[in-house]
Amino acid sequence: METHELLDRLALLYPDNDLLRDLRRAFVDDDRNSLHRIIRSINDTELTNSIRLLDNDMSFVTDSLSRGQIKSKMWIINELKKLNLDLGTVFLCAGWYGILATLIFENNLKVNKIRSFDIDKSVLDIAERFNKKWVQDDWKFKPATYDIHKIDYTGFAYDVSRSNGEIVELYDSPDTVINTSCEHIFDFDEWYLKIPKGKLLILQSNDFFEGTGHVNCCEVLEDFEEQTPFEDTLYSGTLDLKMYTRFMRIGYK
Ligand SMILES: C[S@@+](CC[C@H](N)C(=O)[O-])C[C@H]1O[C@@H](n2cnc3c(N)ncnc32)[C@H](O)[C@@H]1O
């Protein structure tokens, strides 16, 4: 019996079973709403909201939810869980849609608040939507449009918008600086010099030289280690993603 026939018969046999009905619709009728209901019934997380957003918003760059991107982010989460660090106030540099922030919150890592800075103003609304729950929770998450070269990492006054458009100035001093976009950063060495000694750093780069906007790739982990010297290294490793290798470093500068 073909899969669609089996699902059809099961839906007929158990008409009150919503999951079977949705499974049949998702598979046989290619109905995305049914698929979303199934995902929600399994686990209604902010990331599943992101997947729904992906379906509705064409301006969204789907690569942010590619297998490689998700695996890379989960790699951070798993290593941070092992290290059991308190991240305190986080500056998420070149934070894109803030998906890493979503995962940090959802995985209950110790964190006070996350500020995501990206030079591209088109990512701001999406970052807010992905992290709506934590924006609404006393601005535990807030994105802002800034060039990360222009940030003072000892303490930084920056503007954010309220939902009514009103601009508010905030001031924060980060305990942790995260940059998973190191391969995208022009004049990376100059940016690195701006980070004060003693800050906790979580950095990722890769060897995918052909990638769009990849101006600062590394051939091997040792090159990335040379680019980002630490006083105290907590983790330094590689993740094979078939098409390319990602590098990660966690430690105190
Ligand atoms: C493609 S995305 C992120 C890719 C990365 N692998 C990740 O998952 O985090 C790269 C981001 O870096 C941002 N970016 C590049 N240069 C920047 C800069 N100088 N300041 C702030 N954001 C920057 C871009 O706007 C973009 O949102």
Image: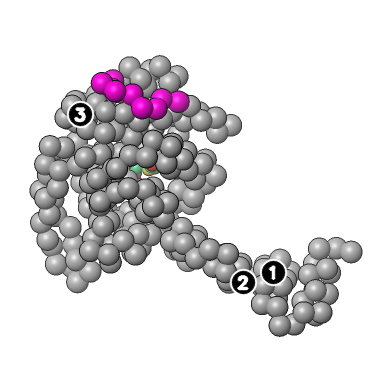
Query: Ligand 1 falls in which quarter?
Result: top left
Residue 108 image position (x, y, % from top left): 39, 52
Asked whether residue 147 is drawn in magenta, I would say no
The answer to whether 56 is drawn above or below residue 69 in the figure is below
Query: Mark 3–mark 2 contact, CB under 8 Å?
Result: no
Between discs 2 and 1, the one toward the N terminus: 1
The answer to whether 1 is drawn above or below residue 87 in the figure is below
Q: Which mark is residue 95?
A: none
Disc 1 residue type?
Leu
Categorize mark 1 by other alpha carbons within 10 Å: few (<14), some (14-19), many (20+): many
Between discs 3 and 1, the one toward the N terminus: 1
Kindly identify which residue carries mark 1: 23
Kindly identify which residue carries mark 3: 198
* Residue at (24, 26) in percent of width and height: 253
Magenta stretch, residue numbers: 229-237
- Of marks 3 and 1, the one in the foreground: 3
Would you say residue 40 is visible in this rendering? yes
